[in-house]
Image (cartoon, rainbow, N blue to C red):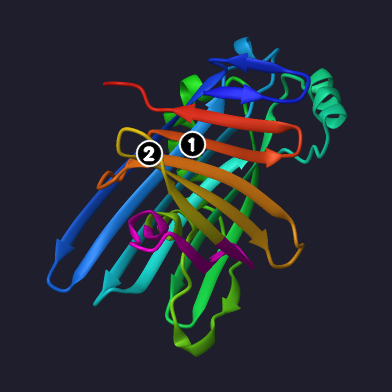
């Protein structure tokens, strides 16, 4: 993983992983996508950030029938480079705040529940799998406060990773779609352009319908491949993350 900012640029500050699985049965297709990423505090001046998301969707007759997701990430409210620097200086060893979410989307509605936990600061990218297991157990034993967002025309609301996958696979150069995460709707606009050696670049812009905030990302992939070669993502104005595939 590569982390970049206007005033700070460093390579090998953490890692990321994507897992993809797809199974077909009768008229339905089940797709699972898992993405996780995090920093190594020893390489980021002590900054510890970690995130995980897993989506499972079922399509039938080329239409989304149902979808479910679970994820968590370190709480990171910083909006500027100065805020991030201040958070780094104040980061202690008493534990880190995480926000977890699980959701289920089906015909006409999207249900989700959020949870807030504090986990030991010893958890970082090197112990991500252990934290995933801990977070699942803790979330599974909690009493969820479900919230619901209704969808128009009885359609099943899409999820983010699956929406990106559909854009990658679509024959059209440009695409527009709406997906739901938690209680919010997002618009995703993408555009693909060919590069050398059979590689295609997909540029995406995410619009939060509630706040109007836009987030940009890019994905490079080879035609027919489900796993990307490279991902660039800018979650904050001062922060750009780059993930590049490694052989293995």
Question: Is 78 part of what is drawn in magenta?
Answer: no
Q: Which residue is mark 2?
A: 228
Q: Which residue is mark 1?
A: 231
Separation of disc 2 and disc 1 at Cα?
7 Å
Q: Viewer-proximal residue, 93 or 47? A: 47
Question: Is 174 part of what is drawn in magenta?
Answer: yes
Q: Secondary structure at mark 1?
A: strand
Q: Split into 4 quadrants, where in the image is the C terminus?
A: top left
Place of residue 224 in the rendered image (x, y in percent of width and height, measured from the top left)? 25, 47
Place of residue 225 in the rendered image (x, y in percent of width and height, measured from the top left)? 27, 44
Q: Which residues are magenta?
A: 166-188
Residue 142 position (above or below residue 134): below
Q: Viewer-proximal residue, 116 or 153? A: 153
Q: Are marks 2 and 1 in contact (CB under 8 Å)?
A: yes
- Residue 38, located in which quarter of the rendered image? top right
Q: Residues within 10 Å of mark 2 (few under 14, many from 20)?
A: some
Residue 13 position (above or below residue 63): above
Q: Secondary structure at mark 2?
A: loop
- The residue drawn where x is 30% and y is 66% is 58
- Residue 237, located in which quarter of the rendered image? top right
Place of residue 197 in the rendered image (x, y in percent of width and height, measured from the top left)? 31, 33
Q: Residues within 10 Å of mark 1 (few under 14, many from 20)?
A: some
């Amino acid at each position: 993983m590569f982390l970049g900012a206007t005033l700070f640029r460093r390579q090998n500050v953490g890692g990321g992983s994507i897992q993809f699985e797809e199974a077909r049965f009768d008229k339905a297709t089940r797709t699972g996508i898992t993405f996780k990423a995090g920093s190594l505090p020893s390489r980021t001046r002590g900054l510890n950030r970690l995130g995980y998301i897993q989506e499972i969707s079922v399509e039938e007759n080329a239409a989304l029938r149902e979808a479910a997701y679970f994820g968590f990430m370190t709480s990171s409210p910083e909006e500027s480079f100065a805020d991030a620097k201040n958070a780094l200086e104040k980061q202690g060893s008493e534990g880190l705040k995480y926000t977890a979410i699980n959701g289920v989307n089906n015909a006409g509605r999207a249900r989700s529940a959020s949870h807030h936990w504090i986990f030991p600061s010893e958890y970082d990218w090197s112990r991500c799998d252990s934290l995933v297991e801990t977070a699942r157990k803790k979330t599974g034993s909690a009493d969820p406060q479900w919230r619901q967002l209704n969808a128009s025309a009885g359609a099943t609301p899409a999820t983010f990773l699956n929406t990106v996958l559909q854009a990658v696979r679509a024959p059209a150069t440009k695409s527009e779609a709406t997906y739901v995460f938690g209680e919010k709707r997002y618009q995703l606009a993408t555009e693909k352009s060919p590069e050398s050696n059979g590689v295609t670049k997909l540029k995406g812009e995410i619009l939060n319908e509630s706040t109007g905030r836009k987030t940009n990302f890019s994905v490079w992939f080879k035609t027919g491949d489900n796993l990307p070669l490279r991902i660039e993502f800018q979650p904050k104005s001062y922060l750009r993350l780059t993930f590049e595939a490694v052989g293995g």
